[in-house]
Amino acid sequence: MFTLSNDDLTAIRLSLQVAMTATLVALPPGIAVAYFLAFSKMRGKALVEGLINLPLVLPPVVVGYLLLLLLGRNGWLGGVLADLNIRVIFTLTGAIIASSVVGFPLLVRSIRIGMEGIDRPCIQAARTLGASWWDSLFTIILPLSGRAILAGMTLMFARSLGEFGATIILAGNIPGVTQTIPLAIYEYTSTPGGDRMALTLCLVSILLSFIVLLASGAASKSLDRK
Amino acid sequence: MHLTVSAHKMLGNFHFAAEFDLTGNRIGLYGPSGSGKSTLMHLLAGLLRPDSGTIRLDETILFDRIRGINLPPEQRRVGVVFQHSHLFPHMSVRRNLLYGWRRTPETDRHIEPEAIIEVLHLGHLLDRGVNLLSGGERQRVALGRTILTCPRLILMDEPLSGLDEELKFQIMPYLNTVFSRFEIPLVFISHSLMEMRLMTEQVLVVDQGEIKQQMATEELALSAWAAPGQGYINILRLGRPQPQGDLWIYPWGDVRLVLTERAEGEDNVFELDAREILLFKRHPEATSARNLLPCTVRKLFTVGNRARVELQCGSETLIVQIVPESIRELELAEGREVVAAVKASAFRRLT
């Protein structure tokens, strides 16, 4: 009754590819920004925080449009990218960038809360015991915020699986190239007789999200046990 | 150890300034909470950067504003034992202990983990998670962890204040054993005069963000006596006891003391309140007090209606507190012989 076409399978593969790449690409800067927000005493902190959180409150379509202005052929960065022969608009790269920007605040917020929960003198103790800053980052700060990092990655992954607004503007809706699950569902619902296909993809979407939640729960438990 | 500090630091409205130069291995930082003791500790450890000045430890410049030197904490080899142990919660006792040791260059490692584990009685705890330890155990692990980095100096920030009285005196012998056995210079921070007297030889008195005084610890204890309502507690280091009937005889210098309390080991610390000692002009032949000690008066000092008498008891010193009227009746004067009577039960064991 519920069968998946080849295009559907491609959409699922693209969705996973976009979500996974976006999450992994955003992780290092996410940790860096979370560290800055959690530990820095600089003045401009509130401003940086606001800027980072903006995609969380803006309509994704607005984010997508701003990215288009920035990365488009005549955009601020677009020219530079064109010179380097990198195309972003209407490509998978565009979809990944859109997901990264929209999911980034969720990742940062989660890691930051985890880092703020670390006992500060514990980090200082590591330094007085002979650990350099990098050493203390890898042996104390990251392990102690492991659960928060995992939670942030889960949130961002799930958010990227569902990304629609920014993606459709920046990457378009090209089957086999940038059409992820939400975009495919959108296309089915606007095509006569596509209801059943849309429903099938909805079920796939629900299943994927559920698997992500279960996997993150299990991983978090195994971190607890350590 | 030789430590030279000239440093200033503004923290909000609090201005901290330290100027001192000292030589010694058992240094105390004494003062009320909020006086700046911990600030000084953070400056020494490199956890806080002075606004100006210099900090030198022996031949090493730890900080020099003008020459642009500021050694990071991991290069200073200055160990810190914090008020609360701050163990790494995601590591076992063993990994906590070895964290610093593994990061110490082999040429600097002159203390073996086995020795520390034995001295601090940590053998049975090694594989435990640190969250299941008691307060005293946690503090022992924190101490071991710091000592294993073989630091040139250990800073202890009120390491006993989080523990209850009984635990305090259980930890103290560990501290004394460790510091005398491994010969590590110590800066001990506390607002407890008793802890200062047990752990240090010299003190820097810190108050309102400044070093007010630098003196021998005993001097500080005696000067504190002059304040109204302050008593004086004699601290006696006694040797291994021998039983005598149902009492115990302890050597104290070349004198022997009779106590009701039993202790084990070679070095036992007891306290004796200066007000619990009676003075007699001549030997009273028979009294209920078990200790009758012939002494010589060395110094007399009177404040209000309290008088402090410093006695020479064989090779040791004893401080007695009486009233000025007694001085007149006993005709006490420097150089005069008296007999001090102390009950066997007046001594209280500290460690």
Image: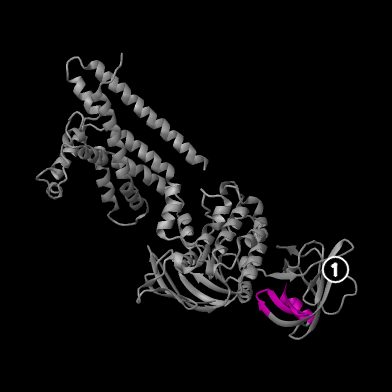
B41 shown above or below A6: below
Report x, y in % for residue A172: 16, 33
Report x, y in % for residue A96: 24, 39
> A93 or A98: nearer the eye?
A93
Kindly identify the amino acid type of the residue bearing the numbered disc 1.
Arg
> A38 or B162: nearer the eye?
A38
Report x, y in % for residue A146: 43, 44
What residue would you read off at disc 1? B290
Residue at horizontal 45 percent and vertical 48 percent from the top? A143
Farthest front residue in view? A6
Number of residue marks: 1
Q: Quadrant of residue A65?
A: top left
| Left or right of B83 in this view: B52 | left
**Residue B8 seen by the camera:** yes
Tell me the subunit letter for badge 1.
B
Asked if the stretch drawn in magenta spans residue B325, the answer is yes
Secondary structure of the residue carrying tag 1 is: loop
Asked if the stretch drawn in magenta spans residue B184, the answer is no
Quadrant the N terminus of chain A occupies: top left
Farthest bottom residue in view? B335
> Badge 1 local density, few (<14 within 10 Å), some, or many (20+)?
some
Q: Which residues are magenta?
A: B301-330
| Left or right of A222 in this view: A194 | left
Residue at horizontal 20 percent and vertical 35 percent from the top? A166
A203 shown above or below B184: above
